[in-house]
Each structure stands twice: as structure tokens, then as C-alpha cells.
Amino acid sequence: MLNTFLILQTITTQVSEIKIESTVFDVWLKIDGESVKCSDLEEAEYLYWAAIHGKREVPIPKDKETIRHIINTQEKAFKERIEKLDAWLKKNIPNLKDRKQIKEIITRKILKPQT
């Protein structure tokens, strides 16, 4: 069997906050203040979605197209959830200010890492 994974990245902490940061030279996935150095932005995005889903050991595919496909699938699913949420809020919550507040709370919960 061909080795299709480049490395197994380990996320060692319980996750409550995740963000991607980059400098001119490096890309980092920040997890509750701890930094995971990534080879590029795509790897950081891939690890971001894995961490959101509660994964702690994440095999990183060698094939960049596989990584891009996984990222696109995750982003599409998130976008679809937000579109459904927007439609439901528009139908059920008449006040725009209330809709925005509710959407913000629910979006944070959707993006809150699973433990």
C-alpha cells in the first residue's frame, strides 16, 4: 500500500479557540495560545477543520489536491448550514438586530471545537 500521508500532526490540548495566523515567512495554527507550524495556508486550513471536528491526531495527505478537496467540502458544508440558518432566521425572527445577534451566537457554536 502506498503511503498517502505526509505526517501525523498531533493536537495536544483541549481546544476552545482556533485561529490561523500568518507572517511573511510562516503560517501557524493557533490553538488556545499554542502554535502549530504549518507548511502552508492549505495545511493550516485542513488542520483547522480537523480541530473543529474534535480530531486530535490528524494525518496530513501528501497530495495537495486531496487537502484542497477536504477543505472545500468543509467550507461548502459550513456555508450551507449558514444559508439554512439565514433562511430560518429571516422567516422566524422579524427584527434585524435580533437576527444578527442570534446568528452570531449560533455561528460561534457551530465553529466551537468539539471536545
Image: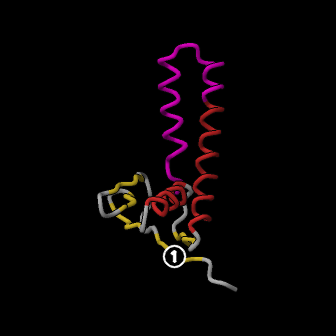
- Residue 85's x, y, as percent? 62, 31
**Please, which colouring scheme is shown?**
secondary structure
Residue sitting nearer the eye, 69 or 10: 69
Residue 72 in percent (x, y) is at 60, 52
Looking at this view, name the residue that lies furthest to the top: 94
Q: Where is residue 3 in the image (x, y as percent from the top left)?
A: 62, 83
Q: Position of residue 100 (x, y in %)?
A: 49, 24
Quarter of the image for residue 4 reads bottom right
Q: Which residue is drawn at 55% across and 63% down?
A: 55
Residue in the picture at 44% in, 57% down = 15
> Image quarter for residue 87?
top right
| Amino acid residing under circle 1 | Leu
Relative to 99, is 76 on the left or the right? right
* Residue at x-position 52% and y-position 27%: 102
Count numbered badges in the picture. 1
Look at the picture and state if 16 lies above or below 94: below
Q: Was residue 102 drawn as part of the magenta stretch in this picture?
A: yes
Furthest toward the bottom, the residue is 1
* Residue placed most toward the observer, 2 or 31: 2
Quarter of the image with the N terminus in it:
bottom right
Residue 8 among magenta residues: no
Q: Residue furthest left?
A: 24
Judging depth in this view, the residue of 42 and 51 nearest the camera is 42
Judged from the image, the secondary structure of the residue bearing numbered disc 1 is: strand
Vertical comparison of 81 with 66: above or below: above
Question: What span is in magenta?
Answer: 86-115
Q: Residue at x 61, y 58 (%)?
A: 70
For mark 1, does the 10 Å Cα neighbourhood hold few (<14), some (14 to 19), or many (20 or more) residues?
Answer: few
Image: 76 above or below 54: above
| Residue with the mark numbered 1 | 8
**How would you classify the magenta stretch by its main secondary structure?**
helix
